[in-house]
Image: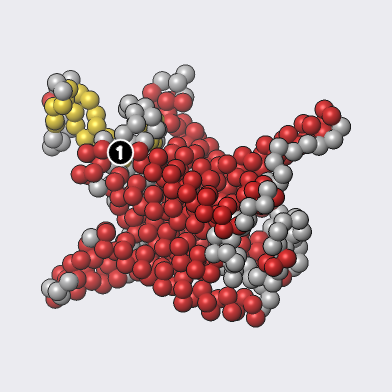
Amino acid sequence: MLYYLFKYLDQMYDLPGAGVFEYTTFRASAAVILSLVISLLFGKRLIEMLRNRQAAETIRQLGLEGENAKKGTPTMGGLIILAAIIIPTILFAKLDNIYILLMLFATVWLGLIGFVDDYIKVYKKDKKGLAGKFKVVGQVGLSVVVALTLYFNDNVLVREQIKIDQVSEAPAGVEVKEINNQLYYTIDQRSTTTTIPFVKSHEIDYSKVLFWMDSEGANKWAWVIYLIVVVFVIVAVSNGANLTDGIDGLAAGSSAIIGVTLAALAFIGGNIVFADYLDVMFIPYQSELVIFAAAFAGACIGFLWYNAFPAQVFMGDTGSLAIGGIIAVMALMIRKELLLPILCGVFLIENLSVMLQVSYFKYSKKRFGEGRRIFKMSPLHHHYQKLGYAEPKIVTRFWIVGIMLAIFTLVTFKLR
């Protein structure tokens, strides 16, 4: 909203300094600052309100050190994160941008699912909360909306280089370039191309999965493959963030690191100079996502003010489902979803630890007559708690791993 206001003032009245709102970096910086301010100011009042309404999460007795001290800590603190993301984005981003609109939609959608889950746990006194099948239906529903929008919307484009043998093959009015004795022209078009790490071309088209079809058939049905990928990514990352939210500050801090990295990736892929220099996919209009990613990172960092050990508030599913979904949807938009196993390595290992624990327990019970465990407890952070590590040490070390993975994700642009 402020972007349009200051653009009008700049054009109509030549207001000094109003033109600075044209710069993505300025608006992203403003979004970070505002998200931090909202987190700090709104967070304190929300925590008091939640305490007054006795919105405390029921603490499961897991035999972990310090769990009794957490009794009475209010939950639904994810509302702080949601407010600190949505308000700066509305104020500083271009609201006619399809990527921004879809990100806001995804944030509200998953925030509502998480809020309903927390509400049932807190006020209906049902520890299970919203039934798992309803959560999955909500995640899949969002996935369908995201996939179809990114595939069919005319404003979702990728700039691609098309090889030709002679200049006459290029469309009229399109500039033709010669690189290493090969003629190319560039065109913005809808595409199912995405970034793949560690290969020379650095890109893969989902339509290639349908290798038994001719090119026309593969392009016609590529949206089905893309839909399956989107569903898997959103459900997996959203639940991974949910599992990671088990000790004070772990999910928020890890998500902030991921958010900063996504902002860098969106800036590179949305800037034609940097995209050309690093030989990565250029996506028109994508640079607006830098503002959203900045607000997201600022919201997670601001939330740590109250969520760092010992936590004054828990984010609950209101926050954890939303931040996981936000990360997944943003990665899909900037065509970096295949980098998520690296970037979201902390979420991945938390997910895998639960899957391995459950699978091995069932297998060993069937084979040996008694269930056996790989870890002392899952998700993985509880395993380290059982080993006697203090919460702050576990969280700090997971953050360090997250930072290393974020740096490695950026380095993959040069590792081909």
Q: Position of residue 335 (x, y in %)?
A: 39, 41
Q: Residue at x 66, y 39 (%)?
A: 355
Per the image, the residue denoted by label 1 is 281
**Image position, residue 327 (x, y; %):** 47, 50
Which image quadrant is residue 78 in?
A: bottom right
The answer, for residue 63, to whether it is visible in the render is yes
Determine crowd level at label 1: few under 14, some 14-19, many 20+ residues with C-alpha closer than 10 A: many
The x, y position of residue 416, in whole percent, is: 34, 28
The reply to whether residue 142 is visible in this rendering is no
Q: Is residue 68 left or right of residue 412?
A: right
User: In the image as oriented, which residue stretches furthest toward the front?
Assistant: 388
Mark 1: amino acid:
Met
In the displayed image of the protein, which residue is found farthest to the right? Answer: 369
Image: 324 above or below 366? below
Instruction: Tell me if 308 is positioned left or right of 197 in this view.
Output: right
Q: Residue at x 25, y 41 (%)?
A: 275
Q: Residue 364 versus residue 26: which sits nearer the camera?
A: 364
Q: Quadrant of the N terminus?
A: bottom left
Residue at image location 84% in from the left, 29% down from the top: 368
Secondary structure under badge 1? loop
